[in-house]
Image: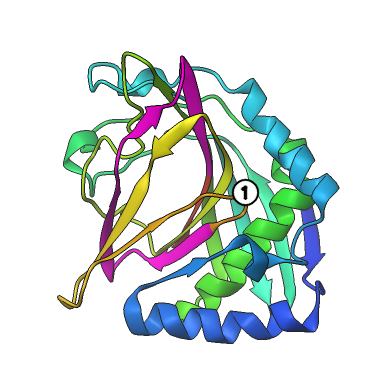
Amino acid sequence: MTNSTSNTLTTGQQLRDGVPAFSEQVRRTGFVVLRKQELAGLIGDADLAELRGAWENLPVDTQVHGVGVYRERRYGRLRVDVDGDTVTLEVLPNAVFRQDAIPLWEGKDRVFEPIAEDVLLGAGMRALVGFDARMATAVNGNTSWTVGVHLVRVVARADADGLPTPEGRHRDGHSCVGLHLMRREGVTGGLSTVHPNDGSDIVQTTLLQPLDSMFFDDNMITHEVSPTVAEGASGVRDMLQIDFNPVV
């Protein structure tokens, strides 16, 4: 049996008012970069600390064998419905993950260990999924979403750089995607590059602090992230990726 929960986003007038402006930028340029301070009030320190703890229990991602990357990963699925400030989440059964839009993964059924329900429905996850869902609804008008949740840790070692995007420059194959940095320790690099479809100037940025984020319309841009380099024996870059597709 799956569980569901409602989350009414009443985390401060400044943040609520920010969604129209942030989503308007996405409609204009295809993406928006959000720094930690711009998400202030969305998630409390204790809830963020609890959410970040989920990255300490990730199995090795065996689906990247042979492409020269070491990472750890879990995957979960949600049904998310948006009604104004109220966002309702329901946990869906785990399933294979397909990214046929990316040549490296085309035609491959990738199976990841599931995210526990208490993590998927925890306060911190609800806050970030709820915010991203309201952004996705503001960007394209859809109110019911099938959502993929990815906990990803890319490990860089002294003898092997971390590869956040072994696919290279790509689009993910979803309607919208939210990316949230959870941890960056012992590494340099990790430069994100956004290539707008309309030929306007590329944009480069580095997510540095927990909650530094990016949200984009996957149909309007392609993107890539440069390797991470260990400053010592090893280092990590932990990301929460939340992808949105309309319920069909």
Residue 161 seen anywhere in this rendered image of the structure: yes
| Residues drawn in magenta | 213-239
- Does 131 sit above or below residue 66? below
Q: Is residue 212 magenta?
A: no
Helix or strand or loop: what does disc 1 sit on? Answer: loop
Three-letter amino acid code at the position of disc 1 = Pro
Badge 1 density bin: few <14, some 14–19, many ≥20, Cα 10 Å: some
Quarter that holds the N terminus: top right
Give the position of the C terminus as an image quadrant. Answer: bottom left
Residue 194 location in percent, x, y?
29, 62
Q: Nearer the viewer, residue 212 or 53?
A: 212
What secondary structure is the stretch in magenta mostly built from? strand
x and y percentages locating residue 148 in the rendered image: 51, 48
State whether residue 1 appears in this view: no
Q: Going 31% across and 18% down the picture, which residue do you hit?
A: 160
- Residue furthest front as drawn: 231
Vertical placement of residue 202 versus 73, above or below: below
The residue that appears at 33% across and 79% down in the rendered structure is 29
21 relative position to 32: left or right: right
x then y, percent, for residue 155: 44, 24
Residue 238 on the magenta span: yes
Q: Quadrant of residue 85?
A: bottom right
| Rendered location of residue 100, percent (x, y) | 24, 44
Compared to residue 139, the image places residue 176 above or below, namely above
Residue drawn where x is 72% and y is 55% of the image: 126
Say above or below: 47 vs 178: above
Q: Which residue is mark 1?
A: 210
Q: Is residue 177 left or right of residue 51?
A: left
Seen in the image, is 140 located left or right of residue 204? right
What residue sits 67% from the left and 45% below the top?
91
